Image: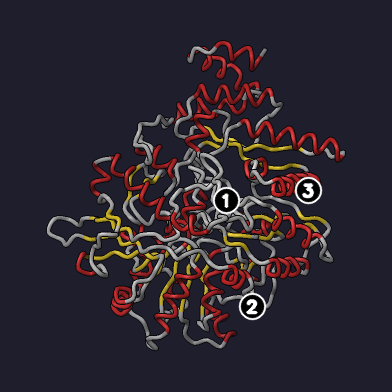
């Protein structure tokens, strides 16, 4: 159900602007997603942040990119800039499976329609706006642009592409979480007290370089010139010639994304012969938001509802999160195949208990709420309020993960603050039960901290999680059973999963609960062979699992696994790594997930004979 009061939302049409009394807008945002006024939807967050500065902001959700471009013209020219937020998910992951087939549903579109966004909306929307309004600055944001800020491998085109800023022809790219950089940019532009054109915008950005942004510049335009402390990457053209150069680049990119005090990154991108060489200039990210800043972003006046234009329509992603609460930002897991730390960073910023409780109280007033919260979570459910014991050590660290290859001795893994949140939420009027739908890091639960008080708290958390916050099935992500593959994934040994499963089942028995543990697994990850998958099938059969939550590895921009998959070298060791690449190789691995299906039996037997492992045939099929 949606609110019917258009004034509660940012306007999406000229008529709605008139209801607000606005004749001209300061900022117009174009979004690849449906407009849901909720803190989990990026366009809504940036729109509300800019609105809080006193700006007149509108959102054009899922504009029609065909025909006469009327959706791009209907609100006219903004005073400051156009912003492009292509969607909460990478558009290609959102639209295509790992086998490059069209998905049957777009979770961020009304009624799951798959025809409301183009491939690469960042590029498509920018080119249309530049055609219609060549003198208006266009700013890119969102995960699609953020993870394509430098030379990157694109799985769907099967080739190395330059920075999406260069391809799209926009004026600036904001990477990572956008509240702080967009606020700073908007405030700088507001000081000019005039309509901003591209020339003025560019001059301002070069005179006042903004953190957490990407610009395309000539050598003489780079503020301060190329300095000794800059990281100068191999050029885009060198990466095209030499895959090892791309692997070497990526280590620098990942490390700077996860440092508290990062360096500026510069990558040459050569123009055609006779043209002046250009450089992609990536300024260091902002340091993590403070709790006060994060609370302020979540406390903005969201309706937490879809825009009234979607009345009687279902937006699948909204249905999943409408009764959930995000407790923190950031993830220090550093999983090789995951983009969360590349976009949000590894340092955890947690909301205050007061802010969380305010949001929960607001949820209890939503139409259709029956007392059950679907998730009290985050990028990883149980990293709330965790940080280094000595923050000075953290500020000097460049490890991409705080818990791989082992849990850092400086990391405080005490779950007390999270338990306090659970208890406070569950005691609120109107709350019958709160569930944990986000992934739980069981290695944090089982870690022996050397402090008996912390160990006891963590055992208490594990017990309460299992007995009070599981909706019948608890999802965890061991990802594989082979320690060699798990090492490349930056995941803990599968031995820990045995321990956690034993604790889970024992706790359920003692509490008289009939609950399941649902593990996630990945096939075809770099370093994984068909034999590894065959052994995974045998191990999971012994554990009495008929696997459901599985996926074939999909290379996505800006992950160490993708760079390993494409280049053939691990970026940190530069040692060769095998990856299954052909459809035949990938299907040969994936089939082992489904050993229990009669249709797969003969193919699996043939594959085990081919690889010289007839011993596994007996273990799988008797």
Q: Secondary structure at mark 3?
A: helix
Picture coordinates of residue 542 (x, y %)? 68, 22
**Distance from Cα at disc 1 to Cα at disc 3:** 23 Å
Crowding at label 1, few (<14), some or many (≥20) Cα neighbours within 10 Å? some
**Residue in view at x 20 percent, y 57 percent:** 271
Label 2 sits on residue = 6
The vertical placement of 473 against 26, above or below, is above
Picture coordinates of residue 68 (x, y %)? 41, 68
Mark 2 or 3, nearer chain start: 2
Instruction: Say if residue 111 shows up in the picture.
Output: no
Q: Which mark is residue 464?
A: 3
**Residue in view at x 36 percent, y 41 percent:** 158
Q: Secondary structure at mark 1?
A: loop
**Distance from Cα at disc 2 to Cα at disc 3:** 42 Å
Mark 2 or 1, nearer chain start: 2
Taking depth in this image into account, of 92 and 269 the one nearest to the observer is 269
């Amino acid at each position: 159900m949606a609110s019917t009061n258009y004034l509660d939302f940012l306007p999406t049409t000229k008529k709605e602007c008139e209801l607000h009394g606005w004749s001209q807008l300061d900022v117009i945002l174009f979004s690849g997603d449906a407009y849901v006024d909720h803190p989990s939807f990026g366009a809504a967050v940036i729109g509300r942040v800019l609105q809080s500065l006193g700006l007149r902001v509108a959102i054009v959700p899922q504009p029609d990119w065909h025909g006469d471009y009327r959706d791009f013209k209907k609100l006219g020219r903004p005073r400051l800039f156009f912003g492009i937020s292509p969607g909460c998910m990478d558009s290609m992951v959102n639209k295509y499976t790992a086998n490059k087939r069209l998905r049957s549903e777009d979770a961020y579109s009304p009624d799951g329609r798959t025809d409301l966004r183009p491939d690469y909306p960042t590029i498509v929307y920018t080119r249309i706006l530049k055609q219609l309004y060549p003198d208006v600055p266009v700013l890119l944001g969102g995960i699609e642009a953020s993870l394509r800020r430098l030379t990157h491998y694109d799985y769907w085109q099967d080739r190395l592409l330059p920075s999406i800023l260069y391809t799209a022809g926009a004026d600036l790219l904001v990477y990572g979480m956008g509240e702080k950089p967009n606020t700073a940019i908007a405030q700088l532009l507001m000081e000019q007290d005039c309509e901003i054109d591209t020339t003025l915008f560019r001059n301002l950005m070069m005179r006042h370089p903004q953190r957490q942004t990407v610009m395309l510049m000539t050598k003489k335009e780079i503020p301060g010139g190329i300095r000794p402390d800059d990281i100068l990457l191999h050029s885009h053209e060198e990466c095209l010639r030499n895959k090892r150069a791309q692997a070497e680049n990526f280590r620098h990119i990942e490390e700077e994304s996860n440092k508290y005090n990062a360096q500026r990154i510069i990558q040459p991108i050569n123009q055609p012969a006779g043209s002046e060489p250009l450089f992609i200039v990536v300024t260091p990210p902002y340091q993590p938001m403070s709790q006060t800043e994060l609370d302020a972003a979540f406390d903005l006046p969201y309706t937490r509802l879809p825009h009234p234009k979607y009345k009687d329509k279902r937006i699948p992603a909204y249905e999943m999160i409408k009764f959930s609460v995000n407790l923190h930002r950031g993830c220090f897991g550093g999983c090789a195949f995951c983009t969360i730390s590349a976009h949000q960073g590894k340092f955890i910023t947690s909301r205050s208990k007061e802010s969380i409780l305010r949001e929960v109280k607001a949820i209890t007033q939503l139409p259709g709420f029956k007392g059950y919260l679907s998730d009290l979570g985050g990028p990883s459910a149980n990293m709330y309020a965790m940080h280094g014991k000595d923050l000075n050590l953290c500020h000097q660290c460049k490890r991409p993960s705080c818990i791989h290859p082992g849990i850092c001795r400086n990391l405080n893994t005490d779950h007390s603050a999270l338990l306090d949140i659970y208890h406070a939420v569950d005691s609120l009027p109107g709350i019958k039960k709160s569930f944990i739908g986000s992934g739980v890091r069981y290695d944090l639960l089982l870690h022996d901290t050397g402090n008996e008080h912390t160990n006891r708290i963590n055992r208490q958390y594990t017990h309460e999680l299992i007995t009070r916050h599981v909706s019948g099935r608890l999802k965890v992500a061991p990802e594989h059973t082979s320690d060699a593959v798990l090492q490349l994934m930056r995941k803990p040994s599968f031995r820990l999963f045995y321990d956690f499963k034993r604790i889970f089942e024992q706790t359920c028995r003692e509490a008289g609960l009939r609950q399941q543990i649902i593990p996630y697994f990945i096939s075809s990850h770099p370093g994984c062979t068909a034999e590894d998958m065959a052994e995974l099938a045998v191990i999971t059969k012994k554990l009495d699992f008929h696997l459901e939550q599985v996926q074939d590895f999909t290379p996505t921009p800006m992950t160490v696994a993708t760079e390993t998959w494409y280049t053939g070298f691990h970026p940190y060791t530069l040692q060769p790594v095998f990856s299954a690449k052909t459809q035949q190789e990938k299907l040969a691995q994936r089939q082992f997930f489904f050993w229990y299906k009669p249709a797969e039996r003969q193919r699996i037997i043939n594959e085990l004979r081919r690889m010289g492992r007839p011993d596994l045939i007996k273990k799988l099929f008797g």
